[in-house]
Image: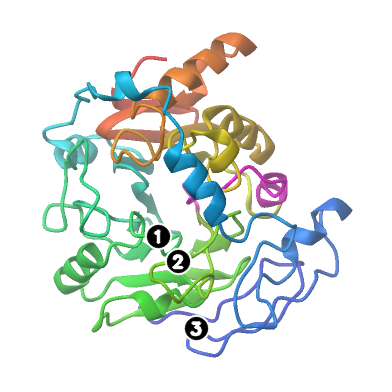
Amino acid sequence: MTPTPLVLPPGRGGAETDAGAAPASLAAPRSTPQDADAVYFESPLTPRGTFHNPWGGMVLPKPADLIRWKLATNPHREEKRRPPSLPVVSEAVQAFDAVDAPLKVLWPGHATALVQTHDANGRRVRVLIDPIFGRAGGVVPRVTRSPIDATTAPAPDVIAVTHGHHDHLDTPAIRALTRRCPEALVAVPRGLDRALPRGVPRVAVFDWWHRLEIAPGVDLVLVPAQHWHRRGAFDQNKALWGGWVVRSPAGSVYHSGDTGDFGGFGAIGRVVGPVDVAILPLGAYAPEWFMHPQHMPPGASLRAFDALGASHLLGMHWGTFDLSDEPIDAGPKALAQEIAREGRSPDRLHVLHHGGTLALEGGVVRRTHAHGL
């Protein structure tokens, strides 16, 4: 499939950009759903050729704050000495395939998600987001193994990467997947194509609010997130970051990527909604004084879910890599506490075992291998 021109969502202003062309700065929109949303449509590209969060969010963690965090005593230190053994679905792909639904999501762990939907002609379409099956950056080990790998994962039509951190853009996984599936399109935010492994045959580069029709009636849209970029010592914020939305006749799935708590979720929901499934983070949030600009705690993900106007929340970014102070299984427990405190029904809030599936067909929701909340 040859990528079609990337364009801003209808009615939001900005110029079209060919997939292989130089980036065009996004113009401020002619109109937005609410005046307060205007800042989320501003260009994240600075005159220096780097990227930032134009609403004034963080740029990079301060070295002094990083040192302060690393030197502080972790209040969860004793608990983390005995990490839990989390369930892993032994036949995750078979369980996923066995669920007959027009829209479903397989969660292998961390931020990896396989979205399977159908186009306007009834053809199956798969988008694999942030695939990583082994160590992050070749260094950080998995606490919980992946139930799939590059050879057993259902073949993707699109591989979409949210940002360049090593636990999200994993070059061994992308290299292996594109060798196995050379027709797969790799979708990345602006500038991140430079970090892809050599020889990737098909690449599409996105700015925020740009879309690509990846199949008849199926759009892939890059939306804002509050985060930052660095893979090496000298590439700070030289590539963009964001979240992905897959829109199809069968429904819409939003994946936040890594993001701090910011005010743009309402704008995302109004522009690309309705959102059927919002895949939002539940981990890597402690200590909150250091993490909150870049990673959301479960309570903030619950507020983002509300702001998006989404129908269902699927928790991610927990239980796989030990990246922060809280225990790896703390996120689902914190989410359950928030649900109880607010008197919510857990019916629309889903936490799966590694390898579990969430499927939707109309108003019917099915889960395989789900944690209780």
Q: Which region of the structure is painted magenta?
A: 247-270
Identity, as a three-letter code, of the amino acid under mark 1: His
Q: Position of residue 329 (x, y in %)?
A: 34, 25
The residue where tag 1 is placed is 165
Q: Secondary structure at mark 1?
A: loop
Q: Quadrant of residue 23?
A: bottom right
Front-most of residues 276 and 196:
196
The residue where tag 2 is placed is 230
Q: State if disc 1 and disc 3 touch (CB < 8 Å).
A: no
Query: Is tag 1's residue or tag 2's residue first in the polypeptide sequence?
Result: 1
Identity, as a three-letter code, of the amino acid under mark 3: Ala
For the N terminus, the image quarter is bottom left
For the C terminus, the image quarter is top left
Q: Is residue 227 above or below residue 209?
A: above
Q: CA distance from mark 3 to mark 2?
A: 23 Å
The residue where tag 3 is placed is 19
Q: Quadrant of residue 352?
A: top left
